[in-house]
Image: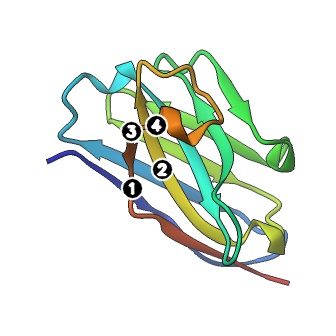
Amino acid sequence: QVQLVESGGGLVQAGGSLRLSCVASGLKFTFSMYAMAWFRQAPGKEREFVASITGSGGNVRNADSVKGRFTISRDNAKNTADLQMNSLKPEDAAVYYCAAGLLGPGSDNPSTYGLWGQGTQVTVSS
């Protein structure tokens, strides 16, 4: 059974940090063949791209809203993709989803990702 499981969400004060982690299991192909990404969705809003990383980890992409604050990384030996979030703002509050796209370019387009986790809640208090 293919699974992406996120963890690390929670409640944090504005200016604080959280580290989200996504663990993949049951993949048909080796983890390094999948581009990984994080998306988020706040209540009443559409799902939006946060950050992505290619299979080798050689290329990353960040949404303008998180540049300089969030860092995506991956460990292909552990089948994990993490999102380090610093200087959190109330507008960063959302459910954060991990996504995997086989041989993907690390796009900001959610349609290029065929696997999704169940999401983890991030709440930022002002």
Query: Which of disc 2 and disc 3 is earlier in sequence?
Result: 2
Residue occupying the point 32% across, 27% down: 31
Query: Outermost residue toward the bottom?
Result: 125
Residue occupying the point 19% across, 29% down: 28
Q: Which residue is under mark 4?
A: 113
Q: For numbered disc 3, what is the local secondary structure?
A: loop
Q: For numbered disc 1, what is the local secondary structure?
A: loop
Kindly indicate the quadrant of the structure image that contains residue 30.
top left
Disc 3 versus disc 2: distance between alpha carbons?
A: 11 Å
Q: Amino acid at mark 3?
A: Gly
Disc 4 versus disc 2: distance between alpha carbons?
A: 10 Å
**Whether residue 70 can be seen here:** yes
Q: Are marks 3 and 4 in contact (CB under 8 Å)?
A: yes
Query: Outermost residue toward the left?
Result: 1
Would you call the spot at circle 2 few (<14 residues within 10 Å), some (14-19), or many (20 or more)?
many
Q: Mark on residue 114?
A: 3
Q: Mark on residue 26?
A: none
Q: Residue 119, how many percent across, how many down?
A: 46, 64
Compared to 53, does 91 lie above or below? below
Q: Amino acid at mark 1?
A: Gly
Q: For numbered disc 4, what is the local secondary structure?
A: loop
**Whether residue 36 can be seen here:** no
Q: Mark on residue 117?
A: 1
| 108 or 59: nearer the viewer | 108
Q: Which residue is under mark 2?
A: 98
